[in-house]
Image (tube, grey):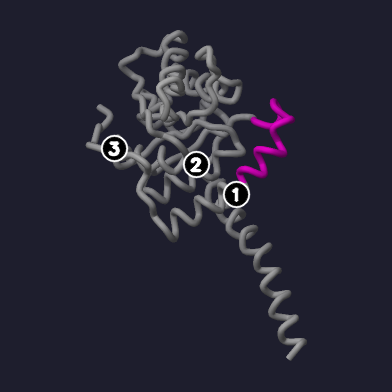
Amino acid sequence: MKYLLKSAIIGFLVSLVLVPILIINGIHNDSLVYEYTDKKSIPSKRVGIVFGALVYPNHTLSPILRDRVDAAIELYHLHRIQKMLMSGDNGRIQYDEVTAMKDYAIHHNVPSSDIILDYAGFDTYDTCYRAHKIFELNEAILVTQRYHLARALYTCRKLGINAVGLALQDFELYPDLQVPYSIREYGADLKAWWQLNVTHPAPKFLGNPLPIK
């Protein structure tokens, strides 16, 4: 009996380690075929989704976010995308990621008419869910760093968007972020799998459809 109990405990502990690893590997393996690093070779899509990130109090984009918007601007000028859906956090009056992103893009010769803002993209799940249900996207290019792209692709594709992604450099440029961001992404991958396969929550905010013309 003690042997069986010990074996059961060991098996349980091993599963606690192996199951998350298998889930995360599955997310990354499923997404790999849709990832691109060359802006000129990525398949053209009408809309590029640019995921928000930290904006400083002076309305300046953080380096991670600036890299995302710069890449989207280049895709636009290469005619790989025609519109940008900028999705981020505007949950407080004094904090507005998407307007800062839009202002930056306009300053770099992207017409305001080709920029659409989603003020309620509080996380990757909400951004992808709203992109499909509110903005009625069935396909898109996702613009984000490599560490985040697999989860973004997995989420969007599971929610009905035929997405490909542009994988931007991350820890080569920002080595100090590798440990904290990798740890955070480990938990975020598991949360995404749980949401997409078990709980299927609605985003924090929905609303009436606003199809991108």
Quadrant location, the N terminus: bottom right
Would you name the residue on which mark 1 appears?
187
Of the image marks 1 and 2, the number of the one nearer the N terminus: 2
Depth check, mark 3 against mark 2: the one in front is: 3
Mark 3 near mark 1, Cβ–Cβ under 8 Å?
no
The furthest residue to the left: 208
Q: Position of residue 118 (x, y in %)?
A: 36, 29
Locate residue 168: give its quadrant. top right
Q: Main secondary structure of the magenta part?
A: helix
Residue 137 position, x and y percent, is 32, 38
Q: Quadrant of the C terminus?
A: top left
- Residue numbers of the magenta segment: 170-185
Q: What's the residue at 44%, 20% (across, down)?
A: 94
The three-letter amino acid code for the residue at tag 3 is Ile
Q: How far apart are the alpha carbons under marks 3 and 2?
A: 17 Å
Q: Is residue 141 above or below residue 33?
A: above
Q: Secondary structure at mark 1?
A: helix
Queried whether the magenta region covers residue 179, the answer comes back as yes
Image spot of residue 29 (x, y percent): 58, 52
Q: Quadrant of residue 150?
A: top right
What amino acid does circle 1 point to?
Gly
Answer left or right for 196 relative to 137: right
Instruction: Give the alpha-carbon distance from disc 3 to disc 1, as whole Å.
Output: 27 Å
Count of residue discs: 3
Which kind of residue does numbered mark 2 sit on? Ala
**Residue in front for this viewpoint, 80 or 11:** 11
> 55 or 73: which is nearer to us?
55
In the rendering, which numbered label is found on residue 134?
A: 3
Q: Secondary structure at mark 3?
A: loop
* Residue highlighted by disc 2: 152
Tell which residue pokes out farthest to the bottom in this image: 1
